[in-house]
Image (spheres, rainbow, N blue to C red):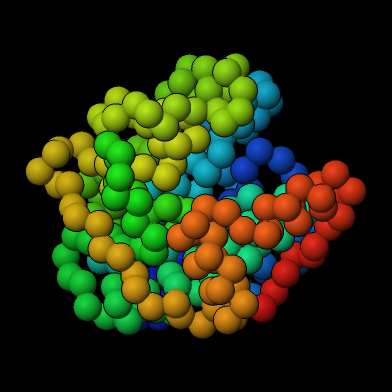
Amino acid sequence: MMLALGNRRYCNAFYTISDGAPDPEIQAFIESRGVTYQPQAPVFDALLANGTAAFEFPTLFSLWTWCKVHPEHSVAYLHSLGSHKSWSLRRQLTRLSLQGQVLTAGKDECEGRLRGKWHCGPNIAASGCWPHYRGNFWRASCEHVNTLEDPTPPKIELERAMAKGAPHGNDTVCPPHGPTGRYWAEAWIVHGHADVADKLQLVEIQGMGDAHWFCRLVHRVFMKNHWNLLFLIDKVSYLMGTTWGPIRM
């Protein structure tokens, strides 16, 4: 989902569904909050028809093209974080925590303080050769987004990622040639610049926003230790066919 921000208020909000048909219940809930469905670009329909997943790229592409027309605004990028996998309690709680950080804490820490070209987000992953916002929830000015190249990888690269199977990409390839496949969606806002002179430092959202305290607790334990009881709960839920919602806190 993308939120377009102007004068510190949401002036446009839309969502795109990748790689499948929308869930009617979730779609009704999203649209009840004033978020408009925007069909993905035809190029992604062609990929899906060929059995090739587009991952997060349809919404990133829509965000990129929107900023071309509205360079004076900024945007917030959110996604399902795999919480469509209704057996995964961990994914749903992590999504709610990151969403609260970006929408609430990010409004003050980023939208209210940063000027010009900028991006910000929670959970900076500084190790490795492509520092990024782990989880891929962030805000950015359109002035920055307009320095980036089209986020969509070449069709052949997406087909290659699908052919290799899970995790559908290579996160060990360094910019400017990687990471590849679905991992490029997570790297793009930081490493997608056409000119290396436009590369910016990552800015971390520190506050936890309005996320429920339980979501924040679970998320912090998971992100700090990379393990928790929810991994076991998720495994059992998957094997038993248990579903959790969507959870709304």
Residue 33 position within the rendered picture, expressed as x and y whole percent measured from the top left: 64, 75
In front here: 110 or 123? 123
Outermost residue on the left side: it is 197
Residue 92 lies left or right of residue 238; in this view the side is left
Q: Residue at x 27, y 80 (%)?
A: 112
The vertical placement of 92 against 150, above or below, is below
The vertical placement of 108 against 142, above or below, is below
Q: On the image, which quarter does residue 191 sit in?
A: top left
Residue 85 lies left or right of residue 94; in this view the side is right
In front here: 17 or 88? 88
Residue 13 shows up from this direction: no
Outermost residue on the right side: it is 240
Q: Residue at x 29, y 30 (%)?
A: 174
In front here: 188 or 72? 188
Q: On the image, which quarter does residue 55 sit in?
A: top right
Residue 146 lies left or right of residue 121; in this view the side is left
Residue 202 position within the rendered picture, expressed as x and y whole percent measured from the top left: 25, 57
In front here: 222 or 149? 222
The vertical placement of 221 against 61, above or below, is below
Q: Quadrant of the N terminus?
A: bottom right
Give the tally of numbered discs.
0
Q: Residue at x 52, y 44 (%)?
A: 56
Q: Quadrant of the C terminus?
A: bottom right
Residue 21 position within the rendered picture, expressed as x and y whole percent measured from the top left: 75, 44
